[in-house]
């Protein structure tokens, strides 16, 4: 058994520290079984992060290729810009959903909040005659306020995120219907409608908005204190607390950002249909969460990327688009998307189980080798 | 004894009706290495938490570095210069080694509140130094700590505590979950702290380790401090009888 570590000062056995410390060079020539397994597990786990995202990207590409063969219209500029515009709102909100999921939370209210922002923003323009840029900002900020309430309920009242945001889902939807009397708000200024329908050269405005969100949030996720703390909190809340991270305040901020993105998505969607629709966004929360999970975010927290959210959102959008192009039953798309979510979540569970089993296996092999030595 | 760097007097702590600590005194001199021993539930972890700001005592006073202190959080104690390696290690599994070493104390390029921009290259460079100076070997700083061995994780937690130039390091059962070789490596790190003059308090059930590593042994029994002994002037048997309150041996390791 003692193949690799004789030169280690402490007297090596087959534990994997042979690979970690003084015996590293020796270990590389002839790695003890344990060392090989430990190094493999780190590698495999990092690979796993990439794999779930790469799998989603591969699925996206395969579906796109298949669709372009089956339907010549798929690759047309008109259709592709349609996919981008339709997918942009989901993608923007999915970026926020990913941030929330990274902290091991969930926000079920984004669809309702987007609708509330949309109709109230629209009413500010139509009824209060507020200039549209101002009303747009107000709509987005309103989303932020809803997020603030969510965050406060989670951090300070200590409700489970699921419950806190489920409540907000009802509250925001109810307010949406109450404020509009359940009728859509029409008569929006053309300047505002360009937010959803305009083009900058060949590029649709919602796509530009999405790119802006991607750039800003990719930076927040990977380069800022907030991003780092979001991962730390989701990875292990107690550790984060012991290391002096103000967990509550950062959670609030995360839900505020998600609310702002929901508000922004709601305003774009409103501009897209030139009206504030009180029905908008039902099921959008599940779609955003699905996009995040398909893109590799873990519902256990600590894991998720902006690029994954974008891939996930567009995978969903392409499935929807393809269903329309191929003229399949429109309800089938929901079935397909549901199945894709199952696969993504099952993969997440499976991966987690394998990692814990492996760790346990390593510990056992150490104990055995200690007993044997 | 020279002026204590960390001193506690009359500490008590209640959990419901349970007195986890009763009128406990403790002190440690600069550069001294001390161990806290006692049976399961004797109150060792609770005393560690009180000394390091993770629990507020119900009674008693704490002095650190010549001043009376009231630590309201672990961060308070960290800022004052007491670093702790908790029994749970307090690592974020999904983050890489560098991120864990600087957890809660990141370096920034630009300070903008929560949107402060991380200075990743500075942290990476310093992380290397922290690991080297504590003798912790980690092959790949960019791998997350999730898949790492118990010894490596312990090493990261200790390097984090030792690498910040703090005056006092507190270790709660630093080798409890480790194999023989990993235990030896952690003990080597602790000896390195001694050479560097860092004050250290450890909780351990392993008397062999305690006698190998520390200058003084403090014994807790049922929440009360039953005594302090210089390692050079006491036998393991005497410590055992202090721990158990009799000359019965229960579940202690002499290996
Ligand atoms: N958060 C808590 N709530 C309630 N009781 C607690 C809590 N923490 C500790 N106790 C109790 O206080 C007593 C001392 O516990 P403590 O964890 O300090 O023991 P310990 O000496 O560290 O034991 P071990 O060797 O098992 O780690 C025990 O009776 C324990 O049940
Ligand atoms: Mg303990």
Image (cartoon, rainbow, N blue to C red):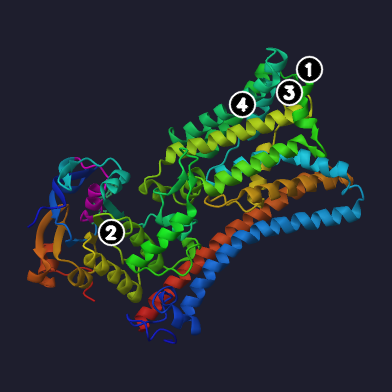
Residue identified by numbered label 4: A172
Mark 3 touching mark 4, by CB under 8 A?
A: no
| Residue span colored magenta | B42-58
| Label 1 near ligand 1 (CB < 8 Å) | no
Q: Position of residue B46 (x, y in %)?
A: 24, 51
Q: Are marks 1 and 2 on the same chain?
A: no
Residue identified by numbered label 1: A187
Residue identified by numbered label 2: B172
Of the pair A173 and B152, the residue shown nearer to us = B152
Q: Are marks 2 and 3 on the same chain?
A: no
- Looking at marks 1 and 3 on the same chain, the residue that comes earlier in the sequence is marked by 1
Q: Are marks 2 and 4 on the same chain?
A: no
Mark 2 touching mark 3, by CB under 8 A?
A: no
Q: Position of residue A22 (x, y in %)?
A: 39, 77
Q: Is residue A201 above or below residue A319?
A: above
Q: Quadrant of residue B194?
A: bottom left
Q: CA distance from mark 1 to mark 2?
A: 67 Å
Q: CA distance from mark 1 to mark 4?
A: 23 Å
| Label 2 near ligand 2 (CB < 8 Å) | yes
Q: Chain of mark 3?
A: A
Residue identified by numbered label 3: A276
Residue B196 magenta-drawn?
no
Q: CA distance from mark 3 to mark 4?
A: 14 Å
Sort mark 4 into few (<14), some (14-19) or many (20+) by Cα contacts within 10 Å. Answer: many
The secondary element bearing badge 3 is classed as: loop
Q: CA distance from mark 2 to mark 3?
A: 59 Å
Q: Which residue does the image show at 13% across and 63% down from the upper left?
A: B216
């Amino acid at each position: 058994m003692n193949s690799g570590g004789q030169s280690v000062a402490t007297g090596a056995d087959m534990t994997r520290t042979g690979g970690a410390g003084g015996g590293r060079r020796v270990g590389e020539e002839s790695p003890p079984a344990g060392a090989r397994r430990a190094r493999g597990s780190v590698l495999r786990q990092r690979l796993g992060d990439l794999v779930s995202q790469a799998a989603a990207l591969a699925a996206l590409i395969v579906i796109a290729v298949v669709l372009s063969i089956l339907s010549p219209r798929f690759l047309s500029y008109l259709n592709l810009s349609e996919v981008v515009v339709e997918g942009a709102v989901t993608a923007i909100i999915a970026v926020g959903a990913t941030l929330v999921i990274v902290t091991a939370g969930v926000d079920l209210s984004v669809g309702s909040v987007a609708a509330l922002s949309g109709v109230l923003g629209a009413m500010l323009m139509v009824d209060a005659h507020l200039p549209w840029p101002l009303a747009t900002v107000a709509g987005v900020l309103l989303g932020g306020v809803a997020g603030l309430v969510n965050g406060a309920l989670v951090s300070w009242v200590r409700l489970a995120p699921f419950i806190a945001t489920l409540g907000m889902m009802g509250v925001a939807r109810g307010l949406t219907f109450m404020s509009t009397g359940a009728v859509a708000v029409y008569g929006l200024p053309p300047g505002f409608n360009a937010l959803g329908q305009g083009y900058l050269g060949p590029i649709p405005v919602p796509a530009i908005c999405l790119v802006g969100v991607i750039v800003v949030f990719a930076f927040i996720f990977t380069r800022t204190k907030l991003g780092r703390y979001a991962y730390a909190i989701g990875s292990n809340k107690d550790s984060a607390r012991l290391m002096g991270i103000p967990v509550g305040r950062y959670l609030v901020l995360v839900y505020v950002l998600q609310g702002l993105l929901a508000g922004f998505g709601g305003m774009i969607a409103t501009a897209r249909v030139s009206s504030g629709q009180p029905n908008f966004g039902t099921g959008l929360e599940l779609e955003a969460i699905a996009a995040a999970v398909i893109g590799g975010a873990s519902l256990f927290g600590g894991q998720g990327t902006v690029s994954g959210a974008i891939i996930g959102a567009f995978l969903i959008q392409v499935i929807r688009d393809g269903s329309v192009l191929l003229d399949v039953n429109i309800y089938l798309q929901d079935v397909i998307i549901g199945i894709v979510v199952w696969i993504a979540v099952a993969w997440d569970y499976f991966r987690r189980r394998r990692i814990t089993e492996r760790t346990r296996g390593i510990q056992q092999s150490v104990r055995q080798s200690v007993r044997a030595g | 004894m020279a002026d204590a760097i960390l001193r506690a007097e009359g500490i008590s702590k209640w959990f419901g009706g349970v007195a986890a600590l009763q009128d406990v005194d403790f002190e440690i001199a600069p550069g001294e290495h001390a161990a806290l021993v006692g049976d399961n539930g004797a109150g060792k972890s609770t005393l560690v938490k009180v000394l390091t700001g993770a629990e507020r005592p119900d009674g008693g006073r704490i002095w650190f570095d010549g001043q009376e202190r009231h630590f309201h959080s672990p961060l308070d104690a960290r800022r004052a210069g007491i670093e702790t390696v908790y029994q749970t290690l307090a690592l974020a599994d999904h983050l890489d080694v560098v991120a864990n070493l600087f957890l809660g104390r990141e370096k920034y390029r630009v300070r903008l509140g929560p949107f402060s921009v991380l200075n990743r290259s500075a942290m990476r460079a310093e992380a290397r130094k922290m690991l080297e100076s504590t003798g912790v070997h980690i092959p790949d700083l960019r791998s997350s700590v999730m898949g790492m061995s118990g010894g490596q994780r312990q090493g990261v937690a200790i390097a984090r505590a030792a690498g910040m130039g703090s005056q006092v390091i507190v270790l709660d059962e630093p080798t409890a979950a480790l194999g023989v070789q990993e235990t030896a490596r952690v003990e080597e790190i602790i000896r390195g702290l001694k050479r560097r003059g860092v004050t250290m308090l450890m909780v351990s059930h392993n008397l062999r380790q305690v006698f190998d590593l520390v200058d003084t042994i403090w014994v807790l029994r049922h929440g009360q401090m039953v005594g302090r002994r210089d390692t050079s002037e006491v036998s393991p048997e005497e410590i055992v009888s202090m721990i158990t309150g009799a000359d019965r041996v229960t579940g202690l390791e002499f290996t």
